Amino acid sequence: MEMVHVLDHPLLQHKLSILRDETTGVKDFREIVCEIATLMCYDATRNLPLQAVEVQTPVAKAVTYQLAGKKLAIVPVLRAGLGMVEGILTLIPSAKVGHIGLFRDPDTLEPVKYYCKMPTDIADRDVIILDPMLATGGSASAAISFVKEYGVKNIKLMNILAAPEGIARVRKDHPDVEIYVAAVDDQLNDHGYIVPGLGDAGDRIFGTK
Ligand SMILES: O=P(O)(O)OC[C@H]1O[C@H](OP(=O)(O)OP(=O)(O)O)[C@H](O)[C@@H]1O
Ligand SMILES: O=c1cc[nH]c(=O)[nH]1
Ligand SMILES: [Mg+2]
């Protein structure tokens, strides 16, 4: 099974180029992060199981298909992952939402956990972890480990932009987790920022810089 999905649909590439532009303001940046999450959700949920149901149309009985089996939860990594939540809930309004608070220590680049709150039935759900940026992969790897501690079996990771180093780290630490990204950039710089990237996603979503 393909474990890394680069979703290079033209609509995604167009919207991503607006995110990258340093002149894009906070309102547009926030809206486009949300739109990209919706578009990515369409692909990341392609393999959800279906069950046959019978409905009466105005014309005849029809055997048709509805979502079956396990329910979904989404888990944004605070802060920047919050920007993707509404975009996913547009398509899956009944998904439950857990939160993991992590920030990356600017000196060590190691993730520091400051918050965690999961739905009580999370172990019975498939989980999509949301974070726009996959840089060193330290935050994503830690977030996946936390979710696994709750007994979740099926986890997907959704990032808008990734560095090759981040993908390699998650593949090594969590080979069972499928990764969905809209683009893979060239490298990280000395401060652990994705190059060319789009800057600090959290600061650009919330206007904190
Ligand atoms: O792959 P990594 O090297 O771990 O870096 C990626 C992490 O860095 C950013 O969060 P940040 O620490 O800036 O926190 P914020 O969302 O609160 O801005 C980003 O949203 C990821 O969570
Ligand atoms: O380029 C990067 C790397 C980590 N976090 C971000 O927001 N941007
Ligand atoms: Mg940040």
Image (spheres, grey):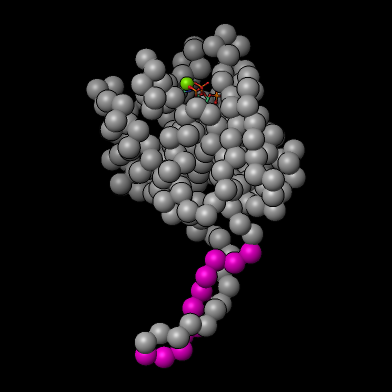
In the depicted structure, whether residue 148 falls above or below residue 9: above
Q: Position of residue 141 (x, y in %)?
A: 64, 31
Q: Position of residue 126 (x, y in %)?
A: 63, 51
Residue toward you, 102 or 36: 102
Image side of residue 78 versus residue 26, left or right? right
Q: Residue 149 in magenta?
A: no
Question: Total of numbered circles in the picture?
Answer: 0
For the point 53% across and 29% down, the residue is 78
The stretch in magenta equals 59-69
For the point 64% across and 35% down, the residue is 117
Our reading of the magenta stretch's main secondary structure is: strand
Q: Position of residue 153 (x, y in %)?
A: 71, 49
Q: Can residue 202 be seen from the camera position used here? A: yes
What is the quadrant of the N terminus in the image? bottom right
For the point 44% across and 39% down, the residue is 84
Q: Can residue 143 be seen from the camera position used here? A: no
Image side of residue 17 versus residue 116, left or right? left
What is the quadrant of the C terminus in the image? top left
Residue toward you, 130 or 57: 57
In the depicted structure, whether residue 44 falls above or below residue 132: below
Q: Residue furthest top?
A: 107
Q: Residue 60 in magenta?
A: yes
